[in-house]
Image (cartoon, rainbow, N blue to C red):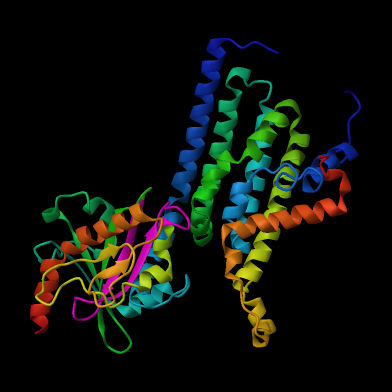
Amino acid sequence: MTDKEPLFSTKNLKLLTTPLNNENPITVQVLGICSALAVTTKLEPSVVMAISVVFVLAVSNVVISLIRNMVPPRIRIIVQLTVIATLVILVDQILKAFAYEVSKQLSVFVGLIITNCIIMGRLEAFALGNKPWPSLLDGIGNSAGYGIILVIVGFFRELLGAGELWGYPVLEKIGIYNFGYEDNGLMILSPMALIVVGIIIWVQRSKNRELIEES
Amino acid sequence: MKRFSNRYIFLFSSIMVILVAALLSSAAMLLQPIQQRNFEIEKKKNILASIGIESSRASVEPMYEKYIAETYVVNTGGEYLDDLVAFEVNLKKEVRKPREERALPVFIGILDNGEKRFVVPVEGKGLWGPIYGYISFMQDLTSISGTIFDHDGETPGLGAEINTDEFQDQFIGKKIFDEDGNFISIILVKGIVDPESLNEVDAISGGTLTSKGLEAMLYDCLLNYETYFKNQKELQK
């Protein structure tokens, strides 16, 4: 390849945008569901979790892509895990230092980013065979696709479950309780996250019919 | 695909491990003072919360100064250990020592209405990791006025319920000594709690091992204060 590809060529942009919709890790590939249920009771931890995953996946994709020709294939899974684990521990330490309250809410789930199948999946499927720049875009795209769903689910669960957004009592300020409205405590429980994800999948597929599987 | 020799593989992994270790340990060292500070703020917040005073990150320092009047370190014999600072005692290390050698912090809070509260820390084992908390006692040194429990990694929805208000509020008004002054600790029971009972609270459904750990923690840690509490009660008479 002698002629240089522009940084944001259509092909590169696609790496960034398809995981947001048509190849969304959660709603289409159905990966990373576990943490999507666990951390989305409120908006704030959802956003922090999303940012953490974006950081971990983007950086690990680039790192793996940079060393892809040096990594002996026989130990490549170990190398990938080491890179991911290092970044996750860094994120965990940084959160403990600068966002202590949120890090307590996220508790074990920050550490569990290591086992998030989206991350190892992207390293194995993409970063090992591509250059750093497309790998970066792919990493950001996929983790953002995961993050968007987390934030949407967190938004609805906090709003309907606690009547708040980012800890601010939105519904109380609107005054909707005066009409006899009550918070739905069920939204706080994990099964409702699954149902919200289900609704997102339904909305997405009714808009985008090519995603519907043949049965 | 390129073939790599075994020597290369060993070399590669060694370099990788050294790099990673250097990176992580320097990050840990850089961030440690900030984390330590968060930890102290959290501790002060918990002590205040156990006597029923809510504080925010910003207000915790002045509130702590205002409400926590005195702190002591005592031993199981009820003697004061003057050379230790209560706030700096690491309970995790203390509970591993033989009972007689333990240093036991006591935080004395004075509420707005002048009532005294005696706060003692507790530390024990849950199902997956450490559980800990603060128990605050009324002026009679028998009835619990508030509790705060927390954990590092109990199962969300099961054992982790120990840090919810519903669970913690059950302890309010329970007594750790019977009418004759014998230490009875707090019992976590399955099923229905006898409302007449002095020291029974409802255990967590699905969190049996955490509940058992919590019960053992309360027994183990509160027993240490038996003599100190009795001495204090004598003084009040």
> Which residue is located at x 14 percent, y 63 percent?
B81
Q: Is residue A92 left or right of residue A117?
A: left
> Which residue is located at x 51 percent, y 43 percent?
A89
Q: Is residue A25 left or right of residue B80?
A: right
Residue B44 position, x and y percent, is 36, 68
Residue B194 is a magenta residue: no
Residue A90 position, x and y percent, is 53, 44
Q: Is residue A51 left or right of residue B65?
A: right
Query: Can you say whether B1 is above or below A209 in the image?
Result: above
* Residue closer to the observer: A13 or B218: B218
Query: Can you say whether B129 is above or below B110 in the image?
Result: above
> Which residue is located at x 67 percent, y 34 percent?
A121
Q: Is residue B223 left or right of residue A36?
A: left
Would residue B89 be visible to someone looking at this image? no
Residue B118 position, x and y percent, is 24, 74
The image quarter in which residue B4 lies? top right
The residue segment tinted magenta is B130-159
Query: Can you say whether A100 is above or below A128 in the image?
Result: below
Residue B235 position, x and y percent, is 9, 80
Task: Report the quarter where the C terminus of chain A lies.
Answer: top right
Would residue B114 be visible to someone looking at this image? yes
* Residue closer to the observer: B11 or A40: A40
